[in-house]
Image (cartoon, rainbow, N blue to C red):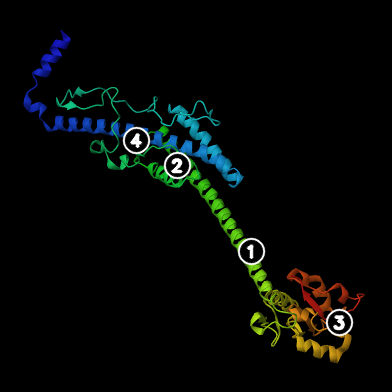
């Protein structure tokens, strides 16, 4: 009887009452509340999805960065990821194990949270005040995206919805972009659509996503440095090989000429000693030796004799006797011997001691017979060893 009486009373309400401004305001308030609840639900689901993606990325990059990322950074990431896993478990989202078993991979999608602090929506009903049907998601239907429900709530709240995607490996080109998208998706939202639990989950996920970006950048920087080093090493090896090939060609280029018969066109002049000529590979080597000598003593090597033609060798033998080799047998005639002065022509001087210690690194040596105690000591005579 009581229900019948209430029903009779409701039916007896005059149209002017149901259409009054008070009733319209009440209907509007209820509609806004329903829209806000729907926006809050979608926001929480979006945060859970973004947090799950951040957790997967954290697990992927921790292993990749263990050898190059500072331990302090990895520790902060591990601690933040552990807290995020805990919050995801509270939210009802599955958490991937730290060491996944190959035969049972962790699920790549995260279902809607089962423990939500906001009210859930019910099947389609009719508003008891306005009599207007209220559309609601049916059981088993796909959850409308934040974009589809934009007309039912504030657009600022919906801007936080991310696009869920599996976390790629740190070496892939899209990982940084995905992490950046996760950071955008976890941006601050109006307080009225977010409860404390969702806010804590979003804040922790943002921290994890930021650390993931930091780790990825360190890994990429290390990869770039490694690639640059490898490229530099490759270029250095190419230059050495090219130099060796050039010097080999220069050595062979004068093999067709007899001792003392090498034309000037097949020889190279020295930049620091006017008039001095040598076989081109020997000239390049002594140029390098001279640069080191000049850095040590502040002056260039003093070259008193270099390539010696056959006629010059004959003249040397006539004027100096046994000091000069028999014409046609001297290394001067092959363009790979020099005589030095300015202090380097005597045993025991600072210049001579330095040459003994360093010249061989540049391919030049004092022959055994020319050394102190040798069969024919000549402190000034140095030869290029090809």
The image shows residue 271, relative to residue 67, as above or below, that is below
**Disc 4 to disc 1, how far (Cα)?**
63 Å
Neighbours of disc 3 within 10 Å: few (<14), some (14-19), many (20+):
some
Q: Is any part of residue 76 visible from this angle?
A: no
Taking depth in this image into account, of 11 and 269 the one nearest to the observer is 269
Q: Residue furthest top?
A: 1
Between discs 3 and 4, the one toward the N terminus? 4
Instruction: Kindly check if marks 4 and 2 are in contact, taking CB atoms under 8 A apart as contact.
Output: no
**Disc 2 to disc 1, how far (Cα)?**
52 Å
Residue 86 percent across, percent down from the top left: 50, 30
Residue 225 percent across, percent down from the top left: 57, 55
Kindly state the secondary structure of the residue where label 3 is placed: loop
State which mark lies toward you, 3 or 2. 3
Kindly state the secondary structure of the residue where label 4 is placed: helix
Would residue 154 appear left or right of 329 to someone viewing this image? left
Q: Which residue is mark 2?
A: 206
The N terminus, quarter of image: top left
**Disc 3 to disc 4, how far (Cα)?**
90 Å
Q: Which residue is mark 1?
A: 241
Q: Residue at x 36, y 39 (%)?
A: 163
State which mark lies toward you, 4 or 1. 1
Q: Residue at x 70, y 76 (%)?
A: 291
Q: Which residue is mark 3?
A: 346
**Disc 3 to disc 2, how far (Cα)?**
76 Å
Kindly state the secondary structure of the residue where label 1 is placed: helix
Between discs 4 and 2, the one toward the N terminus? 4
Neighbours of disc 1 within 10 Å: few (<14), some (14-19), many (20+):
few
Taking depth in this image into account, of 117 and 307 the one nearest to the observer is 307
Q: Residue at x 80, y 88 (%)?
A: 314
Between discs 2 and 1, the one toward the N terminus? 2
């Amino acid at each position: 009887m009581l229900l019948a009486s209430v029903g009779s009373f409701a039916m007896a309400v005059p149209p002017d009452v149901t259409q009054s401004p008070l009733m319209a305001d009440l209907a509007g308030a209820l509609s806004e509340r329903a829209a806000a609840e729907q926006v809050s639900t979608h926001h929480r689901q979006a945060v859970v999805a973004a947090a799950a993606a951040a957790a997967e990325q954290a697990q992927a990059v921790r292993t990749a960065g263990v050898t190059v990322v500072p331990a302090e950074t990895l520790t902060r990431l591990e601690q933040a990821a552990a807290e995020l896993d805990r919050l995801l478990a509270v939210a009802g989202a599955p958490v991937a194990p730290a060491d996944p078993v190959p035969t049972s991979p962790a699920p790549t999608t995260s279902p809607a949270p089962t423990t939500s602090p906001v009210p859930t929506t019910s099947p389609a009903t009719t508003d008891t005040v306005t009599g207007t049907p209220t559309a609601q998601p049916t059981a088993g239907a796909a959850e409308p995206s934040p974009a589809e429900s934009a007309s039912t709530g504030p657009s600022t709240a919906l801007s936080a919805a991310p696009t869920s995607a599996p976390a790629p490996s740190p070496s892939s080109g899209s990982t940084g972009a995905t992490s950046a998208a996760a950071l955008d998706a976890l941006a601050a939202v109006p307080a009225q659509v977010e409860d404390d639990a969702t806010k804590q989950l979003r804040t922790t996920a943002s921290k994890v996503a930021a650390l993931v970006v930091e780790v990825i950048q360190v890994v990429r920087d290390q990869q770039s440095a490694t690639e640059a080093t490898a490229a530099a090493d490759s270029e250095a090896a190419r230059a050495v090989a090219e130099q060796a090939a050039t010097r080999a060609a220069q050595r062979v280029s004068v093999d067709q000429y007899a001792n003392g018969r090498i034309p000037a066109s097949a020889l190279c002049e020295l930049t620091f000693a006017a008039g001095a000529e040598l076989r081109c590979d020997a000239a390049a080597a002594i140029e390098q030796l001279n640069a080191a000598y000049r850095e040590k003593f502040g002056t260039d090597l003093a070259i008193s004799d270099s390539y010696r033609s056959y006629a010059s060798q004959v003249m040397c033998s006539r004027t100096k006797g046994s000091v000069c080799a028999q014409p046609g047998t001297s290394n001067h005639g092959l363009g790979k011997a020099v005589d030095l002065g300015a202090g380097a022509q005597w045993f025991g001087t600072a210049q001579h001691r330095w040459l003994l210690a360093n010249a061989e690194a540049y391919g030049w040596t004092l022959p055994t017979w020319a050394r102190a105690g040798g069969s024919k000591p000549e402190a000034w005579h140095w030869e290029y060893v090809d």
